[in-house]
């Protein structure tokens, strides 16, 4: 019984070490600033980006090597006379 418990404990510790080491190897994006740009003209809130200036965007992802295509996001911010 003791050896069974010892093996189980060893497997648990090995699993935790592998899990933590995998997380430590993840490359996260590091964004310090975001550029807030003036609108190039009238912007309509319709879910389309054809009237947005996309040159100031930042890319954010917690694990670029593995999650870039599934769990990442681009952020864009613009302002006009009355809104940001």
Image (tube, rainbow, N blue to C red):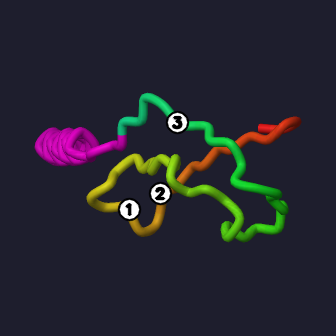
Q: Give the range drawn in magenta.
A: 1-29
- Indicate whether 69 appears above or below 78: below
| Residue in the foreground of this view, choosing between 48 and 17 | 48
Which x, y percent locates residue 51?
71, 65
Mark found first going from the N terminus, 3 or 1:
3
| Residue in the foreground of this view, choosing between 75 and 17 | 75
> Of the numbered discs in the image, which one, if any, rests on residue 58?
none
At a point 32% along the width and 54% down the height, the residue shown is: 64
Which x, y percent locates residue 34?
52, 36
Mark found first going from the N terminus, 3 or 2:
3
- Which residue is identified by label 2? 72
> Of the numbered discs in the image, which one, if any, rests on residue 68?
1
Question: Which residue is outermost to the top?
Answer: 32
At a point 82% along the width and 57% down the height, the residue shown is: 42
Helix, strand or loop at disc 1? loop
Residue 69 sits inside the magenta stretch: no
- Which residue is identified by label 3? 34
């Amino acid at each position: 019984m003791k050896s069974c418990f010892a093996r189980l404990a060893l497997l648990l510790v090995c699993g935790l070490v592998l899990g933590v080491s995998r997380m430590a190897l993840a490359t996260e994006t590091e964004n310090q600033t975001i550029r807030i740009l003036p609108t190039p003209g009238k912007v309509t809130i319709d879910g389309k980006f054809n009237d947005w200036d996309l040159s100031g965007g930042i890319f954010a992802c917690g694990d670029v090597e593995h999650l870039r295509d599934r769990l990442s996001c681009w952020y864009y911010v613009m302002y006009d006379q009355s809104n940001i």
